[in-house]
Image (cartoon, rainbow, N blue to C red):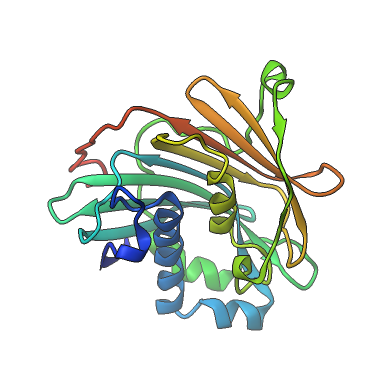
Amino acid sequence: MYSFSNRVRYSEVNSEKELTLPSLLDYLQDCCTFESEDFGVGVDYLAKEQVAWILSSWEIKVYRYPQMGQHIKVSTWPYAFRGFYGYRNFCIEGEDGEIFAEANSVWVFMDTEKMRPARVSERMQEVYIPEIRDEIPGEWADRKISLPDEAVQKSVEKEPVRVSRFYIDTNHHMNNGKYILVAEEYLPEQVFVCGLRAEYRKAAMLGDMLYPVVTMEEKQITVTLADEKGAVICHHLLSDSEKRKGNHKNAIR
């Protein structure tokens, strides 16, 4: 397991002094990025080898959002590799062991020269296979997100959003956390997001236009971002719930 500790900053919280959902995702991304950097297979190595780990899907369960100033520990570990897929869990916890959030993710190992999936390289297996731990127990949803026809018929199209330089990461496309930042704008006020599922189908590039489509269902909202031809770039399914506190101190021990 790889971990790093931090303190929730003022710049990362909302009007209620709670860590925002996009900031929570940034912590998860940072954790696996720091792990790769410390193991010598980080951003520069991937660029040199013309390969990349591309996020295919997220599922995040939020039990409670940390407050401004709280000390947190963010952890990650792989639990399986199959073909060109890598499977990874995450956890954010407090100093007393309270689990704030847990996540499951699926990544695709890509040949960036040929722009197609590739089998996980021997070097990656040497680095990550010794780090494999058990998957977080519990029920995790499928990687793909599908919407019922009756819900789709009630979907509402929103004004398009241009991909600006602020959204672009080291892979030269829109970072997955920035998609959440866009999707969150379409949530009603006073919504407590206790769960997030995201499925990424293609990459948005600098200057592209994103066409949001919002689908409302009971206790959940799906924000689909599509291109100008209507092809889906990503789905985000956000689950709503009354605020609840979770204390799962032994969840991953």
- Residue 167 sits above or below residue 226 on the image: below
What residue do we see at 61% from left, 74% from top?
A: 170
Q: Nearer the viewer, residue 111 or 81?
A: 111
As drawn, is 97 to the left or to the right of 215?
A: left
Pick whichever, 236 or 213, lies toward us: 213
Q: Residue 136 appears at what percent x and percent y?
A: 35, 42
Judged from this view, the residue extending furthest toward the top is 150
Q: The N terminus lies in which quarter of the figure?
A: bottom left
Front residue of 22/124: it is 22
152 up-or-down from 169: above or below:
above
**From this viewpoint, which residue is outermost toward the right?**
229
Residue lying furthest left: 96
- Give left or right: position of 253 versus 40: left
Q: Position of residue 253 (x, y in %)?
A: 22, 47
Residue at 68% over, 72% down: 172
What number of labels is visible?
0
Left/right placement of residue 52 relative to residue 197 reads right
Asked whether, in this view, residue 170 is left or right of residue 41, the answer is: right
The location of residue 217, given as percent across then percent down, is 57, 22
x then y, percent, for residue 238: 51, 36
Q: Is residue 127 above or below residue 94?
A: below
The residue shown at (31%, 59%) is 74
x 60%, y 69%: residue: 166
